[in-house]
Each structure stands twice: as C-alpha cells, then as structure tokens.
Amino acid sequence: MSWDLDQAHQDFQASTRAFTDRQVRPLVEPAEAAGTFPAELWKQLGAAGLLGLTVPEAYGGADGGALPVALLAEELARASGGIAVTALASAYMAAPHIVAHGTEQQRQRWLAALVAGEAVAAIAVTEPDTGSDVARVRTTARRGDDGGWLLAGSKMFITNAGLADVIIVAARTGEPGRAGLSLFLVERDTPGLSLGNPLPKMGWHSSDTREVHLDNVAVAPDALVGAQGRGFYQIMEGFQLERVALAAMGIGHAAECLDLAREYTRQRQAFGEPLTRLQTVRHRLAAMEVELEAARLLTYQAAARLDAGHPEAARSVARAKYLAATAANRIVDDAVQLFGGAGFVEESAVARHYRDARILRIGGGTDEIQLEILTRGLA
Ligand SMILES: Cc1cc2nc3c(=O)[nH]c(=O)nc-3n(C[C@H](O)[C@H](O)[C@H](O)COP(=O)(O)OP(=O)(O)OC[C@H]3O[C@@H](n4cnc5c(N)ncnc54)[C@H](O)[C@@H]3O)c2cc1C
C-alpha cells in the first residue's frame, strides 16, 4: 500500500496543473466579472482529454476512474470554483448517468460530443420543494398517446441549465417514494422546456444556475435513461463521483488559500517584522496544512475505494465530502483572517475562494446528509 499518488497520477496532476495555469487562470477574473463560463474553454478542456476521464474509450474517453476526476477537480478549483463546477457538472455529474445506464443510441448521440466539449450536459433533480429528500421529487412523467412521455414540473438551482444541450431530468413515473422515480434526457429547445434567469449567487459567479420549468414537455419513449423506476438509485449512484469531485474542489480552494496565505504572511510586515515571525501565525498555517492533508487523504481514499468497488466506498465518500467541505471552509476563513483587510475586498483571490467554498457544504448532499449516511442504522 502507498499513501502517495503513483507516478501516472502524479504526471496527470502535473499536466492538469500546467493546463489550468496556462488556459484557465487568465480567464478567471473576466469570467467572474461577466458572470459566465468562458465558452472557448469547452473545446480546450475536451482537447486536453479532461472531459472524458470516466468515459469508455469507444466514445473518446480515457476509461479511467474517480481518482483522476478528484485530481482534476482540485486543480480547477485552485483556479476557480465557478469554472470548475461548470466543467465537472457536465462531465462528471451529468454524463456518468449516460455512461452507466444509457442505451447504445443515447451514448452514441451524446458521449463523444460531451467528451470533445462540443456539447454540455446538466442534471436536474432538486425542486423548489425538495432537495435533500430526493425521494420526494414531484415532477411527473406520464405516458403520452404515442408511447413517449410528458414531463411536468419545476427544477431548482440547476447548474449549467442555461448552457446545456441536454438535461437529465428526474421525474416521477410511478408510486410515491424511491421506486417511482426515473431519469429522462431532455434536449435543449424541446417545446415546453423553459429556463429562469441566472440566479445571482454569493459565489460560483462564473457558473450558470437556474430554475428549469417543464410544461408538458414531450419526449420520445427512448428518452428514458436506465430502467423505469430506477431513477432514485441511479441518482444515489451518481452522487458518489459527484461528492468525490466536490470534496476535491474543497481541497483545491483550501490548497490555493494556504499557498496564498503563506506567501502573504512572509512578505507582510507588522510591528517591524514579517507576520511569519509571529508564532500564532505560523501555528495557524501549520494547522491549516494538517486539516488540508487530512481532507486530501480521505478524498483520495474515497476515490480509490470507489474505483475498486470497495464495500466501504459509500461511507468513505460521505466522510470525505463532510471533512473536505468543512475543512475547506475553515481554511479559506483562516486565509481571509491572515490577509486582514486585504482579504475582505471583493477582488482578492482569498475572498473569492471564501465565497466559492461555502456551497460545498450544501451542494451534492449537505454536511448533515453526509452525517446521516454515516449514522444510518444507529437510531
Ligand atoms: C449553486 C447551486 C448549484 C446546484 N446545482 C444543482 C444541480 O445541478 N442539480 C440539482 O439537482 N441540484 C443542484 N443544487 C441543489 C443542491 O443539491 C441542494 O441545494 C442541496 O441538496 C440541499 O437541498 P435544499 O437546498 O433543498 O435544502 P433542504 O433539503 O431543504 O435542507 C435545508 C437544511 O435542512 C437540513 N436537512 C435536510 N434533511 C435533513 C436530515 N435528514 N437531517 C438533518 N438535516 C437535514 C439540510 O442539511 C440543510 O441544512 C444546487 C444548489 C446550489 C445552491
């Protein structure tokens, strides 16, 4: 057993960092200011192979696992949470449903385009009345006269809704509860599909988040992804990779903030000497490093266990998501503190990471839901 990344993963990490430094970082501030994802980045991410890490080679992917996705998420989030989540939501939160449960026709139609960055996907589960409680989704899908389906309802907080060529929609095809949910592919411009305006958010400014309305949207019989009535279980399965990616994003924010705080405290003078001459400052930096490394280890372990089909994988993922999200929030907060007033002004990088990290305790399953997973069966 090894506690370090093997050479192949270290090489991947290095090349992903080089890509991010060269092609992502220069776009971050303009994208934040514009409130949009830089469209030119899709094809660059695709050309670098970063949108198909878990897609089979037959559709242009690398047929890899969760660990490379974690490494990618970490590097992208070091640069920008908004840009990171946009790419990750399409490639590693929505597309995996097509990989795992799509028909051959659905895979042919979408996967190569998503891997190349020529198409964008979103996943729409959350509704105005339900988020954590996925089994209570109320959007309905009933059979149309032609054997297809009519989808009706509203979805809330959908990442990439305004960019997506295809949205994977969770809808109720049967009884209340888990066994009545199914997933559908809904293509952009399908009559009856409409989007709300971009929701202004405290962070992830370059990510597109909207309400999605389905007013008797007619889709063909073959729009169903996976078996009818298996949607809840497919969503829970998809959450595993999604949570690893979100945990790794937390590590990226925290790692970047720790680097920035080290650099700043070395050069910032107070009372005639650099801040790093103060033991309390040095100890704070050390404690940030310890928390970051603990979260990173748990996240890499969760990714590796997911890839290995380990029986504890789901618990590992819940632990990693909880620790990485909460530790990242403490670390970005510490970084703002170490920067003093310079950390509070809008354009400071640590302020942006502070704003972006907050959603990681909520999205993809809240802290409390991760703790629920870990205490199941106790009460
Ligand atoms: C920026 C952004 C992007 C998002 N992107 C997407 C997306 O692309 N697709 C998508 O489907 N959804 C998306 N979401 C939705 C996100 O997954 C939900 O917000 C999240 O799952 C929480 O659901 P909720 O907001 O309805 O909160 P609620 O479920 O109403 O929870 C409110 C509070 O109650 C707590 N709570 C709920 N149940 C329990 C329990 N059993 N035990 C203890 N505490 C509990 C929660 O932890 C939380 O603190 C996004 C949200 C945001 C803000």
Image (cartoon, rainbow, N blue to C red):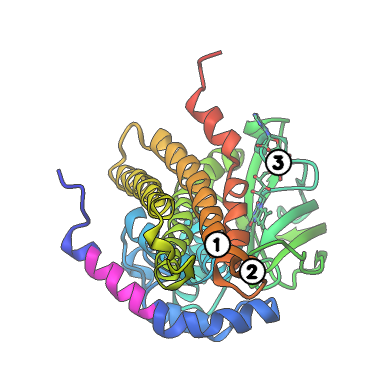
Establish if 315 lies above or below 58: above
In the image, what residue type sits under mark 1?
A: Ala
In front: 273, or 20?
273
Magenta region: 10-19
- Residue drawn at x 18%, y 58% is 6
Please state the horizontal and vertical placement of residue 321, each as a whole percent of the image: 48, 44
The quarter of the displayed image where residue 188 is located? bottom right
Q: Which mark is residue 264?
A: none
Q: Residue at x 75, y 53 (%)?
A: 155
Residue 241 is left or right of residue 60, and the answer is right
Nearest-to-viewer mark from 1 and 2: 2
Which residue in the structure is indicated by mark 2? 207
Q: Are marks 1 and 2 in contact (CB under 8 Å)?
A: yes
Q: Which residue is mark 1?
A: 89
* Image quarter in which the C terminus is found: top right
The residue carrying mark 1 has its beta carbon less than 8 Å from ligand 1? yes
Residue visible at 68% across and 30% down in the picture: 177
Please report contact status of discs 3 and 2: CB closer than 8 Å, yes or no.
no
Instruction: Give the amino acid at mark 2.
Output: Ser
Q: How far apart in space, not on screen, are marks 1 and 2 (Cα)? A: 10 Å
Task: Report which residue position mark 3 lands on.
Answer: 173
Residue type beneath disc 3? Thr
